[in-house]
Amino acid sequence: MAKLFWQSLLAVPAALGAAVAVSGSAIAADATTTQVSNFDEDSVQLAQITSVSELTDVLPSDWAFQALQSLVENYGCIQGYPDRTFRGQRSMTRFEFAAGLNSCLDVIATLLAQSGIDPEDMATIRRLQEEFQAELATLRGRVDALEAQTAILEAQQFSTTTKLSGQADFHIIVPFDTLPDEGATSVAGRARLNFDSSFTGDDLLRIRLQGGSGNALDPFGGLANASGSGAADNDDPSNFYNVSIDDFYYEFPIGSRVTITASARGLSGDDWVTSTIVPYDGPSVADAGGPQFYDAGGSTSNGAGAGISIAFTDSLIFDAGYTASNNGTGDSPGGAVSPSVGLFAARNQSYIAQLSYLSDGFLDLGLTYMHSDGAARFAGNDVTAGDSGAVNTYAGLMNLDFGAFFVAGYAAWQDFAGGQDFNWTAGAGFNDLFIEGAQLGVYGGQLPQLEGYSENPYIVEGYYNIPFNEFLTITPALIWGNTGLEQVDNDDVSGFWGALRATFRF
């Protein structure tokens, strides 16, 4: 009995040290996150075991098998979950630490009640205290340091619910063979700060501040795309200088298959869909890399709206969204939503519905319908008094993924009062070429013919998106295009540009 008592007593500092080490890693992990997971009540409903073989997920080949076997069979102070698992690969919660420590202390209390402590035992206890004095002091110091670090993090943390992230983009655009008045090297930049809050762990409230400046030449209405992710965000840096709220929306799930989004500002067009299918939307430098029909056939301004996303299966997803403008004046076309008109009677409204098939393999597809009551910007759109300049868009998107190689594109037919417009792009590329995470791509196509264009612009871009690390991505690109702009004294409306984009994430 005495031998078992001393073994149990010796097990306490060992078990305590291991538990504190695991608990410390859990505390450090919590310090870098903004969301605490829901606590599983099973974590404290532990079951006493008498043999390590009762733990179904512990194997003799595990590196800690002998330690667990000793603690279970010699000291009797290791417990398992109700399903007879140990779950040794996950971090320990404070509840589990308390339950495990209490189990070891119960063993000691039982031995003390049964045999008591005689003077010789007390002498042995003192000897053990002196022998393990250095280890106990080290353990005490680690606990004190963890408590101090935790107190600092709690006092200095930005928020318990909000994560702050940022992105800065910088462009240099060099014309090689362009129009006479577009022969100078130009630069542009943009900065974003995202405040992402979660209150349940599954929802998201995003508030984005954005500002930028520059003189980037932009014959395509998006050549200097600061984000490489579409023009729905008004990404042309020459259009803004002051910091403004660019995105303001809240999304939350209903069950496991439905997500609802309410937007006060910033969402329109492809912002409502799960995917734009084409993989060069994002890595490319020119804004044409993003399917242009989303922008040309959608809302002409940054507005309020609502959306829903329904995942019928893991691959089949239906998205729908509505946007009404909230800038300008009055209820005229392109104007604001005034109280007398209301959100759903605004002159500038757009609707979108997209059915997407997103596989983990070879084929991704999308079918899109859009309607806009304020997209009168197409060349030849016959807008008369009282007419909203409505545009209907029908589009299909496809990506064929061969592994490291892809072929993708879209085609869109857009119908309006003065006629129709057909636009498309197609491209191919290599993922992880030379560098993991890199993408080499080439795409080209016919862009929408908007107001001021005598014909549909054409563009071809080749780019190489290079992630140097998790914070910096560099993208050099070569861009050729026929602008389609109406020229009076110059018939040569084509150009050739070199571009370099640097993206910093922090």
Image: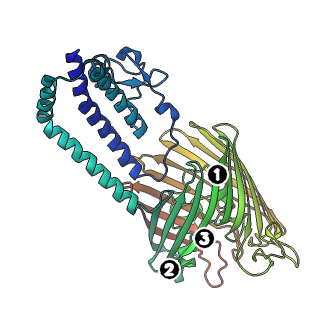
Q: Residue 58, which numbered label?
A: none
- Whether residue 419 is visible: yes
- Whether residue 434 is visible: no
Residue 499, by quadrant, is bottom left
Colour mode? rainbow
The amino acid on which the numbered mark 2 sits, given as a three-letter code, is Asn
Q: Residue 252, which numbered label?
A: 1
Reading the image, the residue beneath label 3 is 234
* For marks 2 and 3 on the same chain, the one whose residue lies earlier in the sequence: 2
* For marks 2 and 1 on the same chain, the one whose residue lies earlier in the sequence: 2
Q: Considering depth in this image, is 342 or 335 the residue closer to the camera?
A: 342
Q: CA distance from mark 1 to mark 3?
A: 26 Å
User: Residue placed at 19% from the left, 43% from the top?
Assistant: 138
Q: Horizontally, is 184 left or right of 15 in the view?
A: right
In front: label 2 or label 1: 1
Q: SS for tag 1?
A: strand
User: Residue placed at 32% from the left, 29% from the top?
Assistant: 105
Reading the image, the residue beneath label 2 is 215
- Residue 438 position, x and y percent, is 42, 51
Residue 344, by quadrant, is bottom right
The amino acid on which the numbered mark 3 sits, given as a three-letter code, is Asn
